[in-house]
Each structure stands twice: as C-alpha cells, then as structure tokens.
Image (cartoon, rainbow, N blue to C red):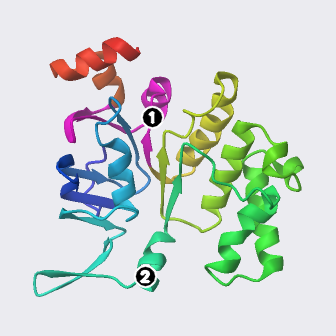
Amino acid sequence: MSTATAEPMVRIRSVRKRFGPLEVLRGVSLDVPDSGVVCVIGPSGSGKSTLLRCVNRLETIDAGRIWVDGELIGYREVGGRLHALPPRELNRQRAKIGMVFQRFHLFPHRTAAENVAEGPVTVQGMGKRQARDLAAELLERVGLADRAHHYPAQLSGGQQQRVAIARSLAMRPKIMLFDEPTSALDPELVQEVLAVMRDLAEGGMTMIVVTHEMNFAREVGDHLVFMDDGAIVEQGVPREVLAEPRHERTRAFLGQVL
C-alpha cells in the first residue's frame, strides 16, 4: 500500500456492525489510497460484503467512522456527536461511490444504453442527449458498443456485468466497490469482466474488490486483506501474503483455495 502522506481516498476506523446478536464487523480499520486497488479475501460469512455495504452506507454502522474523499459518510459530526444525514445528502455521497454486486440488477425493460444513462438523468439531472452520448462512450469502454440496444435478456452474464460496471461509471464515482463481481458467472465469462476491472485499475480508479480470484488479486491488487470472523487477520502486498502468509488462519484458507 502507498506510503504517501496524502489523505487516503477511503479511511475506515474501528467499524463495528451487528445483525441482532451476531457481530459481523469487529473493529475494522483500513486505509485505501487514491488510485489504490485493495482486494479483500476470506471465507463466506467473514464480513467482507458487509464492510463494502457499510462504505456506501447501504448498511448503517454501530460504531466507528468511515470517510470517503475526506468526507464522513452517513453522518455530520457536531461537537463530537454524530447526526445522521438526511436522504438527499446521503444520496449525494453515494453518487461518488460506485458499487457492482454479484448479481447485475439491470432494469430488464431497458436496453444496455438506457440502463447506463438512467442514473445521470434521474439522479444528476443530466440532459438525455448528453446521457446517451455518455452511455455510448462507457459501453465502448467496456467492449459493448455493439450491444447498446440489446436488452439484458439478450446478453450473457458477463455482458450484463459489464453493463453494470458501465452504469456505475456513469455517475463519475471517486471509488468503485466490487462485491464478488464474477461469482455468479460461468467460468468462461469471468475473464471478460476481470479485463474491464484491470483496465479501470490501470486508469487510476480507486477500487475495493471482494474476490475469490486470487490471480487478479496477485496481479492487479496493490494491497491484500484477509478477513475472518468480522476482523482483519492479515494484510500486506498481495504476492507476499499469497506466497508466504504469516497467520495460521490465512494459511489454512489459502490452502483450500489456491
């Protein structure tokens, strides 16, 4: 991870989250530098996806703080007390945090281009012609210029996921969150999505990627985080952690997936 003294793009401090009696995040702290790619790995139920959902406030947190681009997410702090932001302010914050899920969540009755243009028009008030041009530009970027007028049902899973990535990029986010974006895809479609993500990383997009794709983490990630039981167990340079994990729990997990 970068050792520069610049403010991290994402700063997570002592974040805790409960679902009833189950504590799924237990004091997680993490920095993500501007243009950094942090890959998060770990077993199912370790808190990886919940951490992502807390970053863009799809889940509230029970303790701790999260900043994105220097701005406290979900709250305004006054005199040491946190006050929840109203929906309009929260939506403004979310607009700069793109998120791509396991499932694609495209509007089935809209074409690929219409799915990409929807957010800029309805959320940011962009003119429809400008939004159409933006959608065309982004679909070309993800290799789907020739599928702009196809509906989701006419696209493969990998193509739908690439449309979902373009849709998130249309909001001009400061950071992209990926929650196991290839886990719902057939094996032969995985690489086309990873290629788009690799291109984003090379272009300087700040990214947090929850993934089981260890080769991607090794080759593209700047920093690797291993989570288990709601906590960060081990972290470091991806190649080093994957080749010589220090913690017994990390070794056991990697022994199963590598």
Taking depth in this image into account, of 65 and 47 the one nearest to the observer is 47
Residue at 67% across / 79% down in the picture? Answer: 122
Q: Is residue 8 left or right of residue 91?
A: left
Residue 15 placed where, x, y %?
20, 57
Q: Farthest residue toward the left? A: 80
Residue at disc 1, secondary structure: loop
Q: Which quarter shows the N terminus?
A: top left
Start and end of the magenta stretch?
Answer: 208-237
Taking depth in this image into account, of 31 and 182 the one nearest to the observer is 182
Q: Could you say which quadrant of the image residue 65 lies in?
A: bottom left
The reply to whether discs 2 and 1 touch (Cβ–Cβ < 8 Å) is no
Residue at 77% across / 54% down in the picture? Answer: 139
User: What's the mark number on residue 87?
Assistant: 2
Label 1 neighbour load within 10 Å: few <14, some 14-19, many 20+: many
Residue 189 placed where, x, y %?
69, 29
Q: Is residue 29 left or right of residue 74?
A: left
Residue at disc 2, secondary structure: helix
Residue 113 placed where, x, y %?
80, 61
Is 212 drawn above or below residue 113 in the view shown? above
Disc 2 residue type?
Answer: Pro
- Whether 236 is among the magenta residues is yes
Residue at 65% across / 65% down in the picture? Answer: 170
Count of numbered circles in the view: 2
- Look at mark 1 in the image and give the residue it sits on: 211
